[in-house]
Image (cartoon, rainbow, N blue to C red):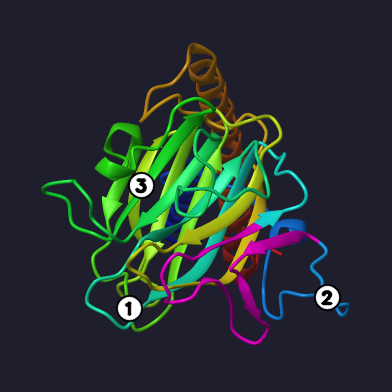
Amino acid sequence: MKVQALLTALTLLRSLAQANTASADEDFPQGVKRVPLRTHSLASPYLDDSLHSRWFDYGGDAVIRTDKYIRLTADRASQTGYVSSRLPLTMPSFEIEFEFKISGKGNLYGDGMAMWITKERDQMGPVFGGPDNFEGLGIFIDTYKNNRPGVTFPYVMAMVGDGKTRYSKEDDGKPNELAGCSARGLHNSQHPTKARLIYVKDSFMRLDLEYKEPNKWTTCFKVAAPPLPSVPYLGFSAETGELSENHDLIAVDVSTLFLPSGPERTTGMGSRTPSDKRVRKEKKGGSWFWFVVKLGLIGGAAYVGYTRYIVYAKNKQQSSQGLF
């Protein structure tokens, strides 16, 4: 019985130790909450009963097929279309997942589509259907290669605009690139593509893609979170030039990210500020304190159980000898 009680106590201690040292995933602390934002999300049929959208504006050549998609451009030359949120995206940390499909009949196609988180809203222009000299963040899905030797297209890249710098279209945005990746196979993929942008203020920004096969996500890039306008708007746009393709926006899901109080923050790729180190040290110290408390409670319980067993065994032995 003594050995059994000891093994039980060790098993409980091992479980507590594993729970105490279990780390969160790579980017999020345990306890992060996602709250869907209906005001910035899109899904079929895209329109209200009055055949209008309460939360989004549409413009240019965009056509809504309520059972399937919002076609930003058709597979015809010189088209431009956009979708723009009516309300700003004011939360400090968020996740945007959007589903889309880029397809066409010819061997040559272009030009591409974009997602915008910018100070401007409801604007068309020469940058994948959106404005040039923008202020904020643009995620560009470029399907036609102009002048970027050694890079495979389609190419997905992020650009942070300051309101003054133009997008270098002739160089496929190379001078403007914050981060990016090749996405060969995205055009005419057998299933729709998904992109997921995660933005945590003062920490990191990450873009994941799902285009090779369903439910297989790959990270396109992860960088320190760039500053955004205080009142940015969410938008999507696309354009065709002499070459063309269909740009279909299928669904948009936006969530606010609520992180637990005192999360470990990163200022870059793994570096931490002194205040963050203090927070981590205090959390570690507190965790070890409770671990010791739990250890003491379990040890005490094991000792009490063992003592009671000894008394019980002794009384039973005396009873069998006729002492009682």
Mark 1 is on which residue type?
A: Asn
Mark 2 is on which residue type?
A: Asp
How far is the residue under mark 3 from the one under mark 2?
33 Å
Front one among 44 and 80: 80
Residue bearing the label numbered 2: 48
Q: Secondary structure at mark 2?
A: loop
Residue bearing the label numbered 3: 157
Residue found 49% across the figure and 66% down from its top: 79
Labels 1 and 3: the sequence-earlier one: 3
Q: Which residues are magenta?
A: 55-83
Q: Is residue 313 left or right of residue 37?
A: left
- Which disc is residue 188 wearing? 1
Front one among 324 and 76: 76
Mark 3 is on which residue type?
A: Met
How far is the residue under mark 1 from the one under mark 2?
31 Å
Based on the picture, tell me whether residue 70 belongs to the magenta stretch.
yes
Q: Secondary structure at mark 3?
A: strand
Q: Is residue 225 visible?
A: no
Taking the view exactly as shown, the residue that stands out farthest to the top is 274
Based on the picture, tell me whether residue 276 belongs to the magenta stretch.
no
How many C-alpha atoms fall within 10 Å of the one at disc 2: few (<14), some, or many (≥20)? few
How far is the residue under mark 1 from the one under mark 3?
19 Å
Taking the view exactly as shown, the residue that stands out farthest to the left is 150
How many C-alpha atoms fall within 10 Å of the one at disc 1: few (<14), some, or many (≥20)? some
Q: Is residue 114 left or right of residue 62?
A: left
Q: Are marks 3 and 2 in contact (CB under 8 Å)?
A: no
- Asked if 61 appears above or below 11 in the picture, the reply is below
Residue found 66% across the figure and 62% down from its top: 59
Residue found 44% across the figure and 27% down from its top: 165
Q: Position of residue 309 (x, y in %)?
A: 59, 57
- Asked if 130 appears above or below 273 in the picture, the reply is below
